[in-house]
Amino acid sequence: MTKVKDPMLFGLIHDFFMEHLPKQKRSSRHTIKAYREAMNALLGFVQREKGLNLHEITFKMIDSSMLANFLENIERQGCSVSTRNHRLNCIRSFYNYAAKMEPAAVFYREEVQKVPKKNSPKLEIVEYMSEAAVKAILEQPNVSIKKGLRDQFLMILLYDTGARIQELMDIRLKDVHAGKTPTVTLHGKGDKIRTVPLMEKTMEHFRRYVGVYHRNEPVYSDQYLFYTHRNGQNGKMCEDTARRFIRSYGAMAKKRCSEVPDNVHPHLWRHSRAMHLYQNGMDLVLVSQWLGHAKLDTTLIYARADTEQKRKAIEAATAQGSPLRESIDAQRYTISDDDVIRQLYGLR
């Protein structure tokens, strides 16, 4: 086995994930997974930027400039400011631990502390796809071949469940329940489990997919629903694999449908499904529960986005010279938290 160039860095990484988080802090497996993904993403970014192998990375290479570039790259991939800040928090936690365990790591922690969190805009307008755009993208995979069948079903399930990409990758065969009311069990943030209904059309695609990819697997199998075959073994599909082909199908669909966004990423399907449910009359509280949001405030972005869309439609439909244009005020169409609560609880 190749020796690492910076034993202190990798020794602290090992102790952080194998001892500190699980045994000392008793963090949940999802919390540990989030921290691990953040560190893996950072190390992978350093590898690509420096053209190095993993074992060649040192503490010194991860300075404030490198970390800032890494975080900017996260946003360029379509992640939100909150996701960026969450990754930064995970990385900071490791460096805080490292500085406590090794005095020599204090300097590197100070480098990390130079990179600030980014403030989210007060009024976040969520990005989502139209139903026409969703349809155009789903038509791109060649379902006559095995990979195309898998790719289309993954996107269909991503849309129908509104799942986070991590939640979708964690689905096992036993989590999908057929019957009169088909459902899938999702394992979300903080070890929270929720059950989401599936459309019968989705189940038809599920049965076709399972017939090809899980032909000999029992219904209650622990096998991951989406997997890749490497070195003679099946392993859980990597989130980046899904991101790559989703982005590719989005680019293909963009040539045929102008409504398709320039950057199609997994979380866009979640936003789109939630928005379509809200626009078709689903109560915002139900949308919040369906998405697995811890707070109703998080779900308010869909109400705001829908209202802003209506404001723009009214503005577009009003002639330029009409005196009515003077009365179109964006503030009148801005939903406050109080407005939503009154509506949800029968006060309006």
Image (cartoon, rainbow, N blue to C red):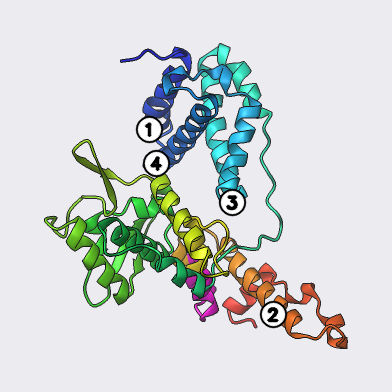
Q: Which residues are magenta?
A: 274-288
Q: Amino acid at mark 4?
A: Ser
The disc at residue 80 is 3
Q: Give x and y (percent) for residue 253.
A: 48, 65
Q: Main secondary structure of the magenta part?
A: helix
Q: Say which quarter of the image contains residue 236.
A: top left
Which residue corresponds to the image point at 74% horizontal and 80% vertical from the top-left? Answer: 316
Quarter placement of the C terminus: bottom right
On the question of residue 234 being in view, the answer is yes
- For numbered disc 2, what is the local secondary structure? helix
Separation of marks 3 and 2 at Cα, in angstroms: 26 Å
Q: Estimate the x, y position of residue 62 in percent, counting from the top left.
A: 57, 24
Q: Which mark is residue 28?
A: 4
Q: Amino acid at mark 2?
A: Ala
Disc 2 packing (10 Å; few <14; some 14–19; many ≥20)? few
- In the rendered image of this protein, does residue 317 appear above or below residue 121? below
Disc 1 from disc 3: Cα separation: 28 Å
The residue at which mark 1 appears reads as 22
Residue located beneath label 2 in the image? 313
Secondary structure type for disc 4: loop
**In the image as oriented, which residue stretches furthest toward the front?**
255
Can residue 177 be seen here? The reply is no
Seen in the picture, residue 337 relative to 113 is either above or below; the reply is below
The answer to if 277 sits in the magenta stretch is yes
Residue 216 screen position, x and y as percent: 11, 56
